[in-house]
Amino acid sequence: MLFVSSPGIGHLFPLIQLAWGFRTAGHDVLIAVAEHADRAAAAGLEVVDVAPDYSAVKVFEQVAKDNPRFAETVATRPAIDLEEWGVQIAAVNRPLVDGTMALVDDYRPDLVVYEQGATVGLLAADRAGVPAVQRNQSAWRTRGMHRSIASFLTDLMDKHQVSLPEPVATIESFPPSLLLEAEPEGWFMRWVPYGGGAVLGDRLPPVPARPEVAITMGTIELQAFGIGAVEPIIAAAGEVDADFVLALGDLDISPLGTLPRNVRAVGWTPLHTLLRTCTAVVHHGGGGTVMTAIDAGIPQLLAPDPRDQFQHTAREAVSRRGIGLVSTSDKVDADLLRRLIGDESLRTAAREVREEMVALPTPAETVRRIVERISG
Ligand SMILES: Cc1cn([C@H]2C[C@H](O)[C@@H](COP(=O)(O)OP(=O)(O)O)O2)c(=O)[nH]c1=O
């Protein structure tokens, strides 16, 4: 089984439980990714780095430089229709194509599982002549996205003699009520959080004496837009009668200077571990973080950098289902944070969606279903 991910931790992690689902069912599993190969290996899986030296931030910068019209128009609007973003997502996929095709020829998979943004996974399935299964991200609808991306990759598709197949199944990330009026693209699956392993100390972290709120901005937001986006959130936190835990992963937080007394910083921590003792979470809107907050049954405030258009669909879902608040990082103030902590209706709705989500088929059940589909 070949798992193909775009180079992003937020893209890779939603594949890990499925990959282990196949492993524990006795299948061979190989991950194709770039930039974050070590993260996939740390999940106990075998990995091939299909594009050494890849840098997502550099790819985004190059796209903006080469396509000023795109940068000034499409890239300034909410990314609702991903077809429009073909030029950027194709640029993310392009460096992966040669390495992934070579890997397919060496490995000869029976199935390719790819995450929604990795069109290269569809090309891999075509090259191998095997079925493909798509893992969706956030609430995004695929529509003509892969066709749009493929239209920027025709040279590579000719070179490797591949065309664009359709997946035999798609697995949603968000539960039904968070898709609002949108049609599901395939099967629903319970979100089982994965954030890496961690040593928690010599005993379980104590339950905090007063409300603790996590502030986390995913794994690419601040890297792409700059750490400044989190500054207004930290300043607002300093005025609130609660404790805050700043979880920015491996990012160097020294540019933030001294933090308010009620804000403590932690390095990379599996998010579900952190949220277990949190009252609420403030974050950028990434699909994995939305779902991990739902798994914790706590309210969330989605406050991305105002330039980040990719979190629009998650913001719509969270606010319309009533499980959280939405803003942008520059507009977060103490009152908004107090509402996030104190509004019981958000907490009730968050628990309802948690109930809905945990009742969905597990990754293990989903793997069985996939195997049935491709064998039948
Ligand atoms: C920063 C950080 C992220 N994470 C996880 C939470 C999510 O599953 C994932 C981030 O994915 P996601 O929320 O989809 O956002 P993005 O793609 O913008 O990074 O990383 C941790 O487990 N610990 C951390 O310290």
Image: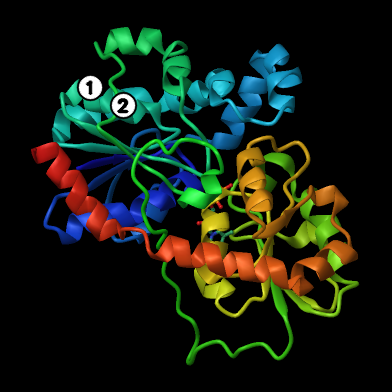
Three-letter code for the amino acid on which mark 1 is drawn:
Asp
Pick whichever, 354 or 91, lies toward us.
354
Residue at image x 39%, y 33%?
51
Residue at image x 63%, y 70%?
348
List the residue tagged with mark 1. Answer: 126
Residue at image x 14%, y 58%?
25
The circle on residue 122 is 2
Query: Dot 1 surroundings within 10 Å: few (below 14), some, or many (20 or more)?
Result: many
Q: Position of residue 210 (x, y in %)?
A: 74, 87
Q: Position of residue 300 (x, y in %)?
A: 67, 62
SS for callout 2: helix
Q: Is residue 322 above or below residue 49?
A: below
- Quick check: marks 2 and 1 in contact, CB under 8 Å? yes
Q: Is residue 291 above or below residue 111?
A: below
Q: Position of residue 144 (x, y in %)?
A: 46, 19
| View quadrant of ligand 1 | bottom right
